[in-house]
Amino acid sequence: MIKKQKNISKKNAQLKKYLDKYFKLRYLLLLAIGILALALFSDFMIVVILMVAFLPVIAWSQILSKIIPHINVDLLSGVSALLGYLYGPWITLVYTIFSGFYALYKSSFIRYLQVVRVIFVALTNFVMAYFTDMTFNQYFIIGIIVQNVILYFVYSVLDPDPIQNYTHRGTHLLSNLLIVRYIFVPLVAFLNMF
C-alpha cells in the first residue's frame, strides 16, 4: 500500500512538473494571440490549410502516374488551377512549383520531361489566374485544354513517342475533368460561402 502511494505521488509530481513546464502564462498568451491571428487572417489560413491538405494528394497522384504506365492521373494542374482561381497568380505559381517538385521527389520520378511539365503547368496556371471573370468550370476546362495543347507540342519535340503522348494528354484531360466535376466544383461552392 505504501509503495502504491509512492507511485501515485511520484506520478502526481511528474504531472505537476509537466503542467508547470508547458502551461505557463506566456504559452497561454501565445495561444490566445494565435487564435486571434487565425480569426483576423482566416482567408490566409484557408489558403495554408488547402495547400497543406493538397500536398500529399498531389504526391500520391504522381506516384500513381508512375506506377501505371502511359496513364497520367496528375492532380497538380487541377489543384493549382483551383488555387489560381481562388487566390491569385502568385500563390498558384509558388505552390505549383513547390508541390510539383515535392511530388517528383516523393515519387523518385525526376526526369527532364516531368520538370518541364511542372514548369509549364505553373506558367499556364499563372497566366490563367488573371482570367477569373468567368465561372470556375469554364476557367478550369480552358486551362486544362491549354495545358494539354502546350504540353503535347513540347512533349512531341522533347520525346517523340506519339502513343505515349496521346495517352498522357488524353488521360490527363479526362482525369482532370472528372476531378473538376466531382471534387473541385463542390469545393469552390463551399469555399465561396466564406
Image (cartoon, rainbow, N blue to C red):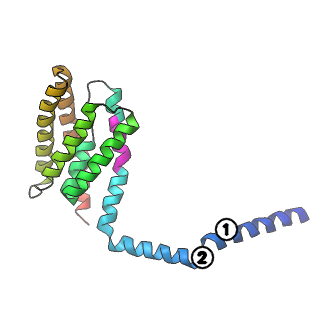
Quadrant of residue 147 within the rendered picture: top left
Asked if the stretch drawn in magenta spans residue 36, the answer is no
Q: Secondary structure at mark 2?
A: loop
> Is residue 186 in sight in this rendering?
no
Give the residue at mark 2: 24
What amino acid is found at the position of numbered circle 2 in the picture?
A: Lys
Residue 176, placed above or below residue 81: above
Please report the residue visible at 70 percent of the width from the left and 68 percent of the height from the top: 15
Whether residue 130 sits left or right of residue 179 in the image: it is left
Q: Which residues are magenta?
A: 54-62
Q: Secondary structure at mark 1?
A: helix
Please report the residue visible at 24 percent of the width from the left and 49 percent of the height from the top: 80
Asked if the stretch drawn in magenta spans residue 58, the answer is yes
Q: Position of residue 191 (x, y in %)?
A: 26, 60
Would you call the spot at circle 2 few (<14 residues within 10 Å), some (14-19), or many (20 or more)? few
In terms of depth relative to the viewer, which is nearer, 159 or 83?
Answer: 159
Q: Position of residue 31 (x, y in %)?
A: 48, 73
